[in-house]
Amino acid sequence: MPRGPEDYRERRYRRQATAGPLVSFHVQVRQSDLFVRASADLSCAARNSLIQLRQGLEAYAAAHAGFLTSLAPLPDDPLAPPLVRAMLVAGQAARVGPMAAVAGAIAEAVGRDLLALSPEVIVENGGDIWLATLSPLTVAIFAARSPLSNRVGLRVPPGASPLSICTSSGTVGHSLSFGKADAAVAVAASGALADAAATAIGNAVAGPAAVEAGLEVARSVPGLTGAVVICGERLGAWGEAVELVRL
């Protein structure tokens, strides 16, 4: 995972995620920049999936003023595309705007499309991960300049996936955060929910003393199964979905 802002911008951390039998490939369509691992090079299928998802999202956003900019939850829309509905529902659960869920929602949607072609799929979208694996997997937590960065990770046991692990940071990356968490990690079955919850958790962490405040937010989000908050030298964790391990 990234070690500093420059590593994050250039996605150098993706070079560390190439061990094992899966094939790695990269797909980018406009702002969506995906790193995918599967049993074969499915880049064409992944690109087609991503294009279709973005077309539906962009058409909906063009027809609904405020969808892209709202920082508050918006009402569910039964007529919206499935991706958009997932974002709307996640925003309501985490009490944030729908765009807080976009990266995780896209990662899951592309991953599920590829799962029809590969028994194992991992999709990483700007630090937000959706995975379906047949063997144990450990996901390192990048926490900007915290001394705990890349020192801890989440171990996903067999049978726990499909699963989403999403991260928000107030100190690195492009995501909007009103907090100062080096890493606010949320775990859920839903990619949209994990992403939206990570944003909400990160917003609550004003500094190292507020790590527990972030975990309180995590506990309040229906459907969330785990969370990790890192701010400076402080770390807090909640949930039993995956195991927190030293690296």
Image (tube, rainbow, N blue to C red):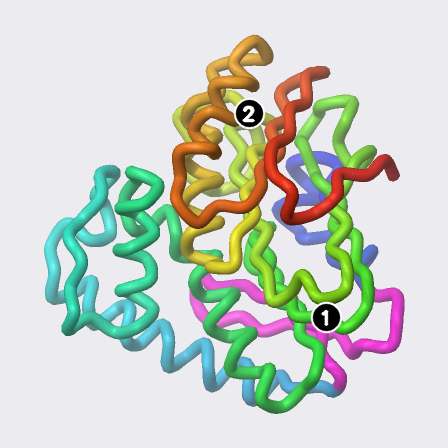
Boundaries of the magenta span = 18-39
Q: Residues within 10 Å of mark 1 (few under 14, many from 20)?
A: some
Residue 33 is covered by the magenta coloring: yes
Q: Tell me what residue is drawn at x 75 percent, y 37 percent.
A: 3
Quadrant, the C terminus = top right
Marks 1, 2: nearer the viewer: 1
- Seen at 68% across and 17% down, the residue is 234
158 on left or right of 238: right
Above or below 68: residue 109: below
Is residue 167 found inside the magenta-colored segment of the image?
no
Amino acid at pointer 2:
Ala
Position of 121 with respect to 82 (left or right) is right
User: What residue sits 56% from the left and 27% below the top?
Assistant: 171
Q: Which mark is residue 133?
A: 1
User: In the picture shown, does residue 146 fall above or below 198?
Assistant: above
Which is nearer the eye, 244 or 28?
A: 244
* Quarter holding residue 85: bottom left
- Disc 2 is placed on an element classified as loop
The CA span between labels 1 and 2 is: 29 Å
Please give the label number shown on residue 181: 2
**Residue at image point 60% right, 38% down:** 239
How many discs appear?
2
- Horizontal and vertical percent for residue 190? 47, 59
Quarter location, residue 2: top right
Q: Position of residue 179 (x, y in %)?
A: 45, 23
Q: Is residue 113 above or below residue 145?
A: below
- Could you tell me residue 158's position as x and y percent? 77, 64
| Mark 1 / mark 2, whichever is N-terminal | 1
Q: Horizontally, is 72 left or right of 63 in the view?
A: right
Dominant secondary structure (helix, strand or loop) of the stretch shown in magenta: strand
